[in-house]
Image (cartoon, coloured by chain):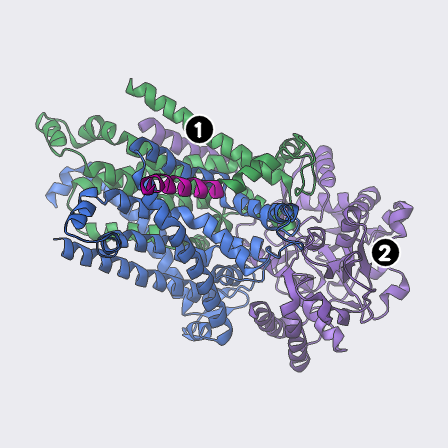
Chain colours: A blue, B green, C purple
Amino acid sequence: MTKGARQPFRTAVLILVWGWLLMLVLAPNLLVVGTSVLSRDPAEFIRLPFTLDNYIRLMDPLYLDVFLHSLYMAAVTTICCLIIGYPFAWALSRVSKRRQTLLVFLLIVPFWTNSLVRTYALKLLLATNGLINNALLAIGVIDEPLTLLYTELAVIIGLVYLLLPFMILPLYSVFDDLRDELLLASHDLGAGRWSTFVHVVVPLTLPGVLAGVLLVLLPAMGMFYVADVLGGSRNLLVGNVIKNQFLDARDWPFGAAASVLLTVAMAVLLFAHRLSRRRLGEEGG
Amino acid sequence: MERVIARWLPRTYLTLVYVLLYLPILVLVVFSFNASRTGYQWDGLSLHWYESLFNNRAMVKAMWNSLWLALVAATVSTVIGALTALALHRYRFRGKRMLNGMLFVVMMSPEIVLAISLLALFLLIGMQLGFMSLLLAHVTFCLPFVVITVMARLSGFDERLPEAARDLGASDFTMTRTVLIPVIMPALMAGWLLGFTLSLDDVVVSTFVSGPSYEILPLRIYSMVRVGLKPEVNALGTLLLVFSLVMLMLSQWILMRSKR
Amino acid sequence: MKKLALTGLMAVTLVGCGSSEPQVLNLYNWSEYMPQEVLDRFQEETGVQVIYTTYDSNEAMYARLKLLDDSAQYDLAVPSTYYVNKMRKEGLLAPIDHSQLTGFNNMDPELINLNIDPDNAYSVPFLWGTTGLAYDADDVEGEPAAWADLWDEAYQGRIVLTNDMREVFHVGLRVLGYSGNSTNPEEIEAAYEKLADLMPAVRTFNSDAPRMPYLEGETDIGMIWNGEAVMGKEDMPSLEFVYPEEGVIVWLDSFVIPKNAKNIEAAHQFISFVMRPDISALISEEIGYATPNLEARNQLEAEVANDRTSYPTPEDMVNAEFQEDVGDEALQLYNKYWELLKAGR
């Protein structure tokens, strides 16, 4: 304690950051949890009494259906990102160090145009009169324009496009740490390529996979604007439901309950992530 | 043969994915110079959309607002984030693990969860939705990224240096200023850049915590693209890209000069 | 480093001061519902800059106004009739000071002093219009003439509906022969069942610019606002507007001033400006909706004044029904079925 008093710098920094996090992270989240167990009020947004109705409503077949469909689209997005990103991150970690810096940088550049603008650019590509259809028609692959825009597929394409870097970056960092000696050792011990991949590469990159899944799956459920622009208000995400409750229907308690559900999903994934790292640590040591 | 494949397959794959990543952006840039109004077919070169963009005062204002917000948010989060990283690195204190954990949770939280929780807070304390609310929100979601970037740099840092400095009689503050900060400078730049990028790219959080008194791009663009094809948006996206690239080159140049 | 921090701090304080700039009018309006020229001319004449932000449904407008109620960020909004009534009753609006207005006597007597707002104490009519049926004559065979034609299997996946709860249910209710303002739970449920049959054929909902899905080639038939049909026809001559047999939906959008508006004087100034016959005529010509300003109607170009899409003839208005407030209880019911409808696939 006396030590703290002698270090005004330390005290000041700790107060600043703790203050920030308590005020802008902990308190708001507690507010949301609190809101989720209150009742809707048409005039003042929320009112007593406490109730669990909002959570029960989430189990209503209607919302359950929206949630499951949103989860399904997010899951497909995540799997696509993983399938594209895994070999990509591996290949990226194999090029020379100097090029790597540039290539990683190139992954970030698209973000400077704002994701809404990029979503809009995708619309130019996917529309019935859009570039993809025009190109395919021109080379004679199809006779009739494909129906791409305002479909589930369009939403998934949009999500994959926007979220792919978030899958690649954590994967790249684990591949970057994966030392060649380990692979060689495995090879020397007589393991075939497949066996090395399954028993060495996959377990060692698992934390990266889980981090990537975490960074893709949950945002993919929340990016309401992708569903709006590319899904034509027909393929709703959980994010759309939450946004509608807060900004259209004014049912805050219900929107808060949906948000708490997302937070719980995040907690479960975070727990799995930690577990995998701990297990890996034990095996390694 | 096998070696050739092993050599070229990864490269081809990398190239392919980059092409797909940049295709929409390329379309955006090319079509921003397209004379056609519908935006689907090529009708010849024109700067018409840039002109109409600059004549759209609300849009230009929103663009400056966005860039300004990103600059300030990145700067504030870099300052707080760097200090936090230093504290986490150097000091032992109660609740250190919890602090770490909280930062990690913020980083992983879906934006929409953060967005509504902040909206609820701002409403409760009666804060006007505008620049301040946007800044607080943006700094909050940038913070953990800065902390992690700076921490990574610090973990590879020789502990004896600051101790030597202190033995020579330097105060904590002096030591931080003269020894630590130069060491973590590249991480500060990286963290700042990350914050700037995240702020400029954000749609979800901004949708909830902004008001008409300080309108930023995402909302402006949102109302435009929902209406339909707007070639001005292409021009705007191109300008943002160019602006950010120039900023980046400028910062690289400054960094190089300061190293010399 | 210190410099950076300082710059940051200065930035905060500077912008903090800047936000109290005077002479700004925050107008909260539907997408594409006010020509830029009007805003520019208003600024030229008065020096007041109009900040135009948009919404795509009464519900969104209402929710955001309530949200920002205390911080008084909007000076003017444009709800539809039934929301004027709701907001007035809930005390969300500031009274209109008629002594500050000029040109109100030009208003069509049939569109003022309605039961939604007696004596126009809280609202001034801006534009009125209809929601009818539109189709692309190049892609649709025959001539659809009724809402019921939407249920034709030929239009699978080619239909657009407005993203407006009340309007979509209005169609469902009228097809079944009920009033579009029904508060009867059984009728609303029946309309829901009817609309649920249509859902698989619906490609998209759009209330920002319902003409766009037609122009983009994504849809061939569906609902549209008459002004959108007029604007759409300029780019796509094959876009036809039809007054459906079951009756068109009629609505009136009015200016209202939110209770805590900062710049009430400029709000009145702007309403007066829009009520000027030349400005009202300009707006109607530009965006295709009908002006309630009789003096402005006399000044319209003949082409616009005689356009049946903008200004319907009495026979077009047979079966037409005006949108009315249905009350919170019925609204919650509509809301529930609306969510069901949009979530169902």
Q: Is residue C246 magenta?
A: no
Total numbered labels: 2
Residue tagged 1: B247
Say whether residue B88 is left or right of residue B110: left
| Circle 2: element type | loop
Badge 1, how many Cα within 10 Å: few under 14, some, many 20+? few
Label 1 SS: helix
Residue at the bottom extreme? C186
- Give the quadrant of residue B217: top right
Residue in view at x 71 percent, y 54 percent: C214
Chain designation of label 1: B
Majority secondary structure of magenta residues: helix
- In the rendered image, residue B5 lying in the magenta stretch gets the answer yes
Type of amino acid at the residue the image marks with label 2? Tyr
Q: Is residue C126 above or below residue A36?
A: above
Residue farthest left in this picture? B167
In the picture, which quadrant includes the N terminus of chain C? top left
The image shows residue C122 at horizontal and vertical percentages of 70, 57
**Residue C109 locus on image (x, y percent):** 85, 59
- Circle nearer the viewer, 2 or 1: 1
What number is the disc on residue C311?
2
